[in-house]
Image (cartoon, rainbow, N blue to C red):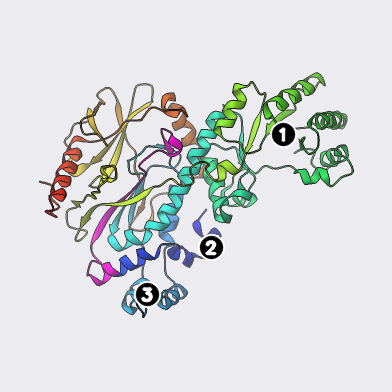
Amino acid sequence: MALTDITRPSDVALNTDLYELTMAQGYWESGLVDGEGCFNVFFRDAPFKGGYGIACGMGQIADLVENFVYDDESIEYLASIQAPGGGPMFKPGFLDYLRDFRMRVDVWAIPEGEVVFAREPMVRVQGPIIDCQLIETALLNLVNFQTLVATKTARVVHAAEGHPVSDFGLRRAQGPDGGLAVARASYIGGASSTSNVLAGKIYGIPVFGTHAHSWVMSFPTELDAFRAFAASSPKNCVLLLDTYDVRQGIKNAITVAKEMEERGERLSAVRLDSGDLARLAKEARKAFDEAGLPYVKISVSNDLDEYTIQSLFAQGAPIDSFGVGTKLATCDPQPSLGGVYKLSATRETPESPWEPVIKLSEQAYKRTIPGVQHIRRYYDAAGVPVGDMIVDDSVDSGDTTSMVDVLDELTSFDLSDATPQEMLTQLVADGHHVGEPESIEVAKARCREAFMHLDPATKRFLNPQTYPVGLERGLARLRNELALEEAKGSGRRSRA
């Protein structure tokens, strides 16, 4: 699996916002080629007004870094870009620098499939500041959307109460790349399969699909269509019941199921794609059971999401599986995660000490956290996560028993009875993979395990409990000191 499966390797570096290149040229011209930065990726609010996110996209970061090159064609294109004020936007010397460019960053991230919470670093990138800047857009493009999709899928799968959920969203996804990202992230988030055949080939995801209404409409009668499909696909026979009349469709499906039994075959399932799904599912279940066909499963589709599925079960609908398309692929009703990539520390050379930096705003909500950060997740005796502490080792006070709320310095959390675990793992060192890449199955299993241990109050859809995320006390003091200095206009970046 790699970003380059469907694009030329040289396209990877150009998959960026123009201002990343203009800033890189500015760093180069300002003599900051040896300067280093530390950046963090995080989101400020959990998606879908929920209590958590599912980290996703991290498994492709190392491929992004290793394929981040500028070939002659890329350099030629950049040389052709004109500045609004006239003349080339990029200088020949900078383009020569890019021609020999290779990423030298180090990257740490929360492992794919793990639960992640607002304000904490999902990904930390550090290294030459030019490198860190150039990779920003492409990295956010990977992590933002896939984290959003994986989170949406986890919610849908949670509502499905253990019944299989298949990704049916390709035709409604935002282009081919979007369709592949949806298939990959939804599988990690808990989907059992996808309709996307290319995603099955690239990522090894199980693929699923049967027939559409057009199949039924192509035959003289619905019964003829069902018989033909059963003959063509006896091992994958799911009949779509609602092309004309569902009740007659049920009768025709029973007829075909009996005929299949005579041949030693079985009708796998029927699918409902319109109407009152709860009522129709009950009618279908009753009819199949009375016909001696209790093994025939009931599958439903039609603009489903976590709330619809939850409602169907609340009505006692006997549904066995779900095909979720549009609202999964488009992450309805939230089309963007809003993850950001913020500078938290700088140093003049790789041998210099890190100097923490902070971004202030007229909105205190947008104040960043300084320092080279990592995360300690605390677990109770039952393995349930009870709080995440953001730490900078250079200012660590050594207090592992409590932390200060990330948004409210007057609120603290007691962690004295919990056991910490480091959450960020290194993916890239000096521009290269660290260890063997994880399989998508490992990420999927991690998601299942992490979600199972998450407090139900944090997982609920309506007014979820806010999961505690806080700052280690030394980092909390540093943040306040830097904020006061910057607010006074001193411009100093000091640990004192």
In the picture, the disc for residue 296 is none
- Residue receiving disc 2: 7
Earlier sequence position, callout 1 versus callout 2: 2
In the picture, the disc for residue 84 is 3
Question: Residue at image x 43%, y 35%?
Answer: 49
Question: Residue at image x 65%, y 31%?
Answer: 321
The magenta segment:
26-53
Mark 3 vs mark 1: in front: 3
Earlier sequence position, callout 3 versus callout 1: 3
Residue 305: give x, y in percent of width and height. Answer: 57, 35
Q: CA distance from mark 3 to mark 1?
A: 56 Å
Instruction: Please say if the residues under marks 3 and 1 sit with CB atoms less than 8 Å apart.
Output: no
Please indicate whether residue 251 sits to the left or right of residue 178 in the image: right
Residue 381: give x, y in percent of width and height. Answer: 35, 21
- Residue receiving disc 1: 272
Under circle 1, the secondary element is strand
Residue 332: give x, y in percent of width and height. Answer: 53, 42
Under circle 3, the secondary element is loop
- Under mark 1, the amino acid is Leu
- Under mark 2, the amino acid is Thr
Earlier sequence position, callout 3 versus callout 2: 2
Please indicate whether residue 126 sits to the left or right of residue 62 in the image: left
